[in-house]
Amino acid sequence: MKKNMRFKIKFTKITVFLISVILTALVAFWLPMSNYFIPKAAEAMNLGLEKENPIYTVFSDKATYITDDWEFYWEELMVSEGHKLYIPDLTVDLPSAWTTYEINGERLNSGGYASYRKVLKNLNSSENMVITLPNLPGAYRVYVDGVLVSTNCGTEGDIRNTNLSNVQTKNYPISFDYSDNSEYEIIIEVSCQYSSGITVLPVLIEYEHYMSNMTALLVFRFFLVGIVAMFVISMIALSIVAFKDSRFFWLVLLCLTFMFRVLISGNGYLVANYFFFGLSYEIILSFIYATTYIIKLALLMHISRSLKLKISDNFMVFVSGLFLVCVFVPQFVTEIIYDSANYMFLQAVSYVIDIYLIYKISVEVAKKKRFSVPFLIATCILMASLVVDNYFINGYISKNVEFVFPVAGTVFILIVLLVQIVRIGEAYVAEMHAAELKEELADINMRLMLSQIKPHFLYNALNTIKYLIKKDPKTAEQVVVKFSKYLRANMDSLTQKTPLPVEKELDHVANYTDIEKHRFGNRLNVVYDIGCKNFVILPLTIQPIVENAIKHGINQKPEGGTVTIKTYDDEEFFYVDITDDGVGFDVNKKPDENDERSHVGVSNIKTRLKEMLKATVEVESTVGVGTKVLVKIPKNDETRLEEC
């Protein structure tokens, strides 16, 4: 049965792990796959191809992505400098980094400036349109037939001298009127300090729709930041006032990093740039990359502490060091951080940790640990959204999905908040309940203590010692020592407010049974079968049960009998089994007056074990056969000392 239970748990955790990883991967990579390769294959609309009479109608509620066959002019500003050479260095597809281009056998470096040119034919639109490059790190200006229609670096000055320290994204509406053989020349000038050209998809979209959508997203972005900020303030207040726990530190760090990333990424930087001392968006982009690792490190630390995952300190140190390297080293090696291919490979380092964390949480789900399911769902959502956000920042997703990470991050934080509210509520209820039980348990402990120091046991023990002094002084001395230890353990239990190792309680049982064996002689046999002793139990719980077994079971049988004390464990519980082959009793029969005191003692033990350790006591007895008392203690960090 034990093997079947272990197999069931192992099968469950593998199933949960595989389902979680597969669903996370599907969500994380579906958007990049469907929005990068599909637009290049199908949604590009072949805007520059010759056909008999093509008319391309641009719908106001849909974006058109201009991907293929752009002429590339290295270190040329065709409109700003009036160059009309029209002899391209290369023909390229977008999005792409020019660090992948070769001119005259040499690969281009990051940083620099260039122009991209494409001719669109036979366009027709009923609304004013705009061509823009959302989320491009470098400075750009878009011209249609020599007229500026979009820029993120203002309209004045040389584009090569701007570093986007003051973001001024402006869009000017244009319209396309269909006529035979109508052509529109699109020229995009780009200047980069560290990055490498148009690494996002140029988008053609209706002007009013674009502006209203961007405004709505900006408002929504800061609304989410406000929600998380309130949550952070609450957590800090709770950690100061009530709960001094490292979980809150890592959760607050995660929230602050999340807020920072949401504020500085996408169109959020249009507002937030005023608070960052004029840093260019290219520099800020490196901070966005770094936050990925900080968020994942804080996530790992918070969840490992919240669910009390078994993760070694050495592994935590290794992950922390690895993530710190990924955060800081690329800042000094710009060709890594600003090359999207290199950076996406660098991001893959964190995916291994993602899979590991999902596996560890899946193990806890299989064990049915409380709150493990919401943590697993929230973690998968956050990890998938980070992958999507990284692909979007690097231009692998054509559609504007900048809201995915802010929403997913807020969902994660709200789930964690709900868990914390439940925990705080339970802690409050438990505290109130504990206050009510404090006096009751104190009274129970006192009555239990007094019940253990029974006059008849003291008289019997002293008489036994008196007899042994005359017959066997050396043995009498040993019994006196055991009797002293027995009394001391009883007295110590008055001040013992926390559980103690089961081994100590078994020592107390041994002192008691050794004294009784001298009194009962061959009529009493005590057998110990200790399979597991690395757990805790309350003081004066096993000994009173053993005493009942001797007094009401073995003593009532003329020939005596055996009391067996056994401990063992399985995946869920620690067990203490006290069995005797005495006279037994009818468990359904109300105890008579002679047994009432014993009944109250067992009842008190049940109450204490339930309230302090969530343990249960099961009693089975058959008249003429014997009695079995089984104590079941749930396995958790409060009851487990170490693996048995």
Image (spheres, helix red, strand yellow):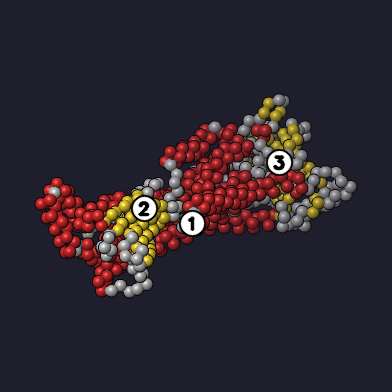
Instruction: Give SS at disc 3.
Output: loop
Secondary structure under tag 2 reads strand
**Residue 612 visible to the viewer:** no
Residue depicted at 33% across the width and 60% down the height: 581
In the foreground, 161 or 465: 465
The amino acid type found where label 3 is placed reads Leu
Q: Which residue is mark 3?
A: 94
Q: Are marks 3 and 1 in contact (CB under 8 Å)?
A: no
Point 35% across, 49% down: residue: 530
Mark whose residue sits in front, 1 or 2: 2
Disc 3 crowd rating (10 Å Cα; few below 14, some 14-19, many 20+) is many
What residue is disc 1 on? 368
Residue 35 coordinates in the image, percent (x, y): 69, 48
- State the image coordinates of residue 313 (x, y, percent, origin top left): 42, 41
**Residue indicated by mark 2:** 567
| Front disc: 3 or 2 | 2
Please state which amino acid type lies under the numbered disc 2. Thr
Position of 9 with respect to 95 (left or right) is left
Give the residue type that dot 1 points to.
Lys
Q: Is residue 204 left or right of residue 307?
A: right
Q: Nearer the viewer, residue 36 or 151?
A: 36
Please tell me how crowded label 1 is: few (under 14), some (14-19), or many (20+) other residues with Cα within 10 Å.
few
N-term-proximal mark, 3 vs 1: 3
| Direction top: furthest residue | 105
Distance from label 3 to label 1 (Cα)? 49 Å
Disc 1 to disc 2, how far (Cα)? 24 Å
Mark 3 or mark 2, which has the lower sequence index?
3
Residue at position x 57%, y 51% in the image = 15
For label 1, the SS is loop
**Closer-to-camera residue (302/405):** 302
Q: Say whether marks 1 and 2 touch (CB < 8 Å).
A: no
